[in-house]
Amino acid sequence: MLQPTYLKQFLYGICVCLVFMAQRVNAQVVIGTPNLGFTQACASDSFNTYNTTFVFSPESALNASNQFIIEMSDASGDFTEPTVVHTTEAGSVTVSPATIAFSIPETTAGENYRIRIKSSAPAATSSRSVPFAAYYKIQDSPFTINNLVSTGVYCSGGSYLLSIDNPGNGNNDSPLQYPSLTFKWYKETGPTTSAFVADGPTLSVSTEGTYFVRTNYGTCTSDSFSNRVTISEAVSGEANATIVSSLGNPYCPGEGFTSLSTISGVSYQWYKDGNIIAGATDQMFQTNESGIFSVQVDLGDCSASGTIDLVSELFESSIDVPEFNEMSEEDSLLVTVTTTAINPEFIWYLNGNIIASATGASFEATEFGDYVVRITQTTDCTTSVEYLFSIEEELDLFPEVEHIPNLISPNGDSINDTWIIPAQYVSGTDTEVIILSSQGKIVLQTKDYLNNWPETDLNLTNINQVYYYIITTADNKTKKGSITVVK
């Protein structure tokens, strides 16, 4: 009688286990609607972390391999093609309520995004969150329009096109470099108020006023906005064409060329100091000079002109020696530069090599060669100027020679280039020197001979052309002979 009782108990235990296992297999988890730890997601490269908190039940229903997934809708709140913005590690979230951080994609831009939470084991999906504005501010700095020219003019009955500069001037971070961005144009209605005008990267204006554009980041605040441009109508046929220097005015030439920009028109002609600049027929003109620059702009049915007195911050300086210098081997040459440069730095070079000991405004040169001194202003506008000069060995015009030479070769090699005669016949001895061509024409006659004939090209017709000389001393002693000039 005992055996059936044990069998019943055994079968009962098996049934209980099967029921328990069936309940475990069919267990479900319910995920509550996610609560947002923010009201709007205004992300950037410096901040992109947002939290959501949700509850789920029962905790025991989660498998060890379970992952929670945060999905984000499109900008209208639709989950047809959701974007996964975060997935937890398997089994890392086991306690309810749970808080998970996520980041939004760089392409996010809209006012009605939602998120939802999904579990993988067992599979479950929460309801959608409340809608929220979300934008990734991929560009969040001021930018320029109209080449930073603050004005624009249109002819009566016409219009003026405003556009975002791409890439813009200087370090302008043009938002046109980011294809996903959109833009909204505004017209000022008061000192601190404005009205929306239109969308797009350009705006055709036919009404006078001051306009600007913002990158469309919806209700998120942003620093991605343009300069203001005031548009007017040319009622008299002639209008003002504002000119702007990209490096400012005065400008620092050490930063390179500055770009002069004017209002948009049909054609352009630039002038400097009242003179036409050949080929300068674009809306922009680059220069590294100072002067009064002006432009004539053809607007189609009317015209405009403008002028700017452009000033360079290049300092003034000078050097007290000529470009070419001579000295004897035992002499030296003191060279001094003067400058108005602020906190100047001086670097001296000889034949391309820095002279380490020369760091001041003066230098005493004792060697022959090619010199350069560079003056650099090291405060405010950093810029440099250079002066070049050379020192050669002084030519001895009156060397000691015993005989009157009868051959010279004036080829520019500084050897036997001129007819050098003994010292008793040169300048200061009251000796007359006459040189005649082979036809008897006097080519030189002087009582002050400096050993410098010929000073100019003789235009020789023969390879070895012959000249004749007559030397008459103060006591009427005469010497005669020939001079062969070798070509």
Image: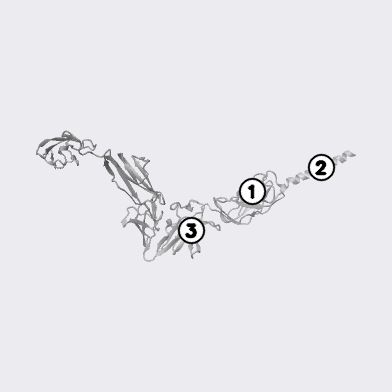
| Residue depth check, mark 1 versus mark 2: number of the one nearer the observer | 1
Cα–Cα gap, marks 2 and 3: 77 Å
Picture coordinates of residue 419, whole percent (x, y): 18, 37
2 vs 181: above or below = above
Q: Residues within 10 Å of mark 3 (few under 14, many from 20)?
A: many
Q: Amino acid at mark 1?
A: Ile
Q: In this rendering, does residue 362 appear at all?
A: yes
- The residue singled out by tag 3 in the image is 213
Q: Amino acid at mark 2?
A: Gly
- The residue singled out by tag 2 in the image is 13
Cα–Cα gap, marks 1 and 2: 39 Å
- The residue singled out by tag 1 in the image is 69
Identify the residue at the far top of this view. Answer: 402
Tell me the quarter of the image containing the C terminus. Answer: top left
The residue lying at 34 percent from left, 40 percent from top is: 350
Q: 8 or 219, which lies in front?
A: 219
Q: On the rendered structure, is 437 left or right of 56?
A: left
Q: In this rendering, does residue 463 appear at all?
A: no
Picture coordinates of residue 261, whole percent (x, y): 39, 56
Identify the residue at the far right of this view. Answer: 1
395 vs 278: above or below = above
The residue lying at 15 percent from left, 38 percent from top is: 425
